[in-house]
Image: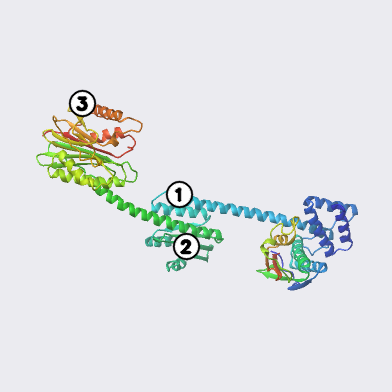
Amino acid sequence: MAQVPHTAPRDEVRVHVAGYEGVLSARKAAREMAVKLGFTLADTTRVTTAVSEVARNIARFAWSGVVVLRAEHSHGTPALTVEAIDSGPGIADPSLVVEDGYGTADSLGLGLSSARRLMDEFSVVSRAGDGTTVKMRKSA
Amino acid sequence: MATFEEGYASVLGGHLRSPGEAGLDAAQDLGRRALREGLGVLEVVVTHEKVLAAAGFPREPVGERAGEEAHPALDFLLQALAPFDAPRLGFKEVREQLGFRHRQVEQLRALTEASFKMLSTFDPNDRLLLLEEAATLSLSGASVATAAGDQEEQELLAKLPPDARESFRGFKAGENFVRASWMSDAGPIHLLVARAPTPIGAGPVIAAWKQGDDFSDLDRALFRQLSQLGSVAVTNARLFEHERDIAVVLQRSLLPLAPRGAHGLELASCYIPAHPGASVGGDWFDAFELPGDRLGLVIGDVMGHDVLSAAIMGQFRIAVRAYALEGHSPAGVLDRVENLCSALVGDSYATLLYATVGTGGELFLANAGHPAPVVIGPEGRASFLEGGLSVPVCIGAPAPTRTERCALFPIGTTLFFYTDGLIERRGSSLDACLAELLNALSQAPVPLVGHLQAWCDEVVASLTGEGPEDDVCVLAVRLAGS
């Protein structure tokens, strides 16, 4: 079981995403939180990649949104939760976007389907015209 | 456009000079590009090493945790490889899904096979056992028990794991489906109990329980499906059993009683219905005492060998006996039966032979279209007893003229009456079949006094073989002397 670091991480970080700089900020915050929570190098890369995917989604489709990162401890196991919220055009059928190949033909390993697989838990709540919220979680 | 290696060298170089998220994000894009161009993990690693070697960067020490060392080159490589991780995890996910679907197919197969097997038997207890077997097969790892009625529910309760009583009480209170989970010393226990109502009453109760992981949604759906299937199958089988019991009682009431002989006249009989599941057909015999040390002997065959034939046979049987006991001659009996039954039996008709035989060997006989009986002399010679022949009864023709044959036989003679089921063979002519009968009776040893029934059974067995194609009825009488 991963050790809980002595220096308790900040429990919540909110990153405003509007354009490419926001994507990089979200990545940075996710990496720092994963490192502090004691994630392995490989898992830190997975979390950062997943956060990058949801942040890119905001930057590309919604122009602006927020990524909220939370450090949690469940039965002594640290976990990182991500909530990516935007008020963009939304998605008519969220179940489709987490399938392989949604959007373009060369989207293998990209987008929300990729983020879903890199994390332990994943959900999308969206309505057309009403924004999108992606929730993800990964334990160390 | 720059090659993948050129692009990789340019982005990695920039990242190593100034490590940061921008470089890592660009590495992620390089990984995506590699995927798009069909490159594998191995090609990306080789490219990474080649670019590092060409630039002369030193090797980095790598700690176990992400934060322990600064290793921008490794971070870059990992980030370039991260896009490959999702398809790998996706493959694992798909493989698990395939395994799950395979199990689903197996479960559904078990359900289908259970339906087929259950409908292949009419016994409610067998159906209940098959239900249990199907549930055990389709709910892997679960224990299963069933109960057919209120009495058995107590036995079922005894089979359930401890602590299941509470859930079972809820079930008894009128629920048709109960699902419960609780923690035992050995870990979590999950229980399903169901009883599906049917239009003809409640079906059997089925319970399944297991330790560890809970039943899946599909498990629960299958369980309820099995419960419904079992309910219909078992209640239908019970209904069928009830109807069959009624039919058997009614059929048995039509069966001839084992005939009693008279002083100096020994009797034997044999009756084999051809229809599987039926215990009576359209063939019959009868034998009864008449005044003057005589016996009345009847053998007949109603067209067809189904239940309707059996019902009509019962009417003929009573009619013949009633007129015979009134003391009419054989031809007089046939005339009266014709008159009475024509209006009763619809399109049906019968061949019918009625004879009276006295202890002195005197015989009177009228034969309405029935195969001629065989006479076996004291020395064993067999011959047909022709004569007294007219058309079958109730064939709808103008009132036929019935004739009679009378004869006198010596002591030790056996008269052998039969229906056509004994002699008819598919593909053989009637003459050939009759010749075979005569041959068999000639070759059989002469029946000994007191052993006519055994002799009769042996003769019938030798002629019918594995099973007759039609009903078989035989009546034999031996002039035993005083």
The colour style of the image is rainbow
Read off the residue under disc 1: B117
Residue carrying label 3:
B381
Q: Is residue A103 above or below residue B415?
A: below
Q: Residue at x 31, y 47 (%)?
A: B307
The answer to whether residue B251 is above or below residue B403 is below
Q: What is the chain identity of the residue bearing mark 2?
A: B
Q: Residue at x 70, y 57 (%)?
A: A100
The three-letter amino acid code for the residue at tag 2 is Val
Side of B210 where B330 appears, left or right: left
The residue closer to the viewer here, A70 or B220, is: B220
Q: Where is mark 2, residue-wise?
A: B193
Query: How far apart in space, not on screen, are marks 2 and 3 (Cα)?
Result: 73 Å
- Circle 2 sits in a helix, a strand or a loop, which is it? strand
The answer to whether residue B212 is visible is no
User: Which sits in the foreground, A10 or A66?
Assistant: A66
**Measured Cα–Cα span from mark 1 to mark 3:** 54 Å
Q: Give the amino acid at mark 3.
A: Arg
The quadrant in which residue B424 appears is top left
Residues B404 and B400: in front is: B400
Q: Quadrant of residue A36?
A: bottom right
Residue A118 percent location from the top left of the image = 72, 60
The quarter of the picture where the C terminus of chain B appears is top left
Question: In the drawing, what numbered circle is on residue A6?
Answer: none
Which is more N-terminal, label 3 or label 1?
Answer: 1
User: How many numbered discs sit on the rendered protein?
Assistant: 3
**Mark toward the viewer: 2 or 1:** 1
Question: Where on the picture, by quarter, is residue B16?
Answer: bottom right
In space, the residues marked 2 and 1 are separated at their CA atoms by 23 Å
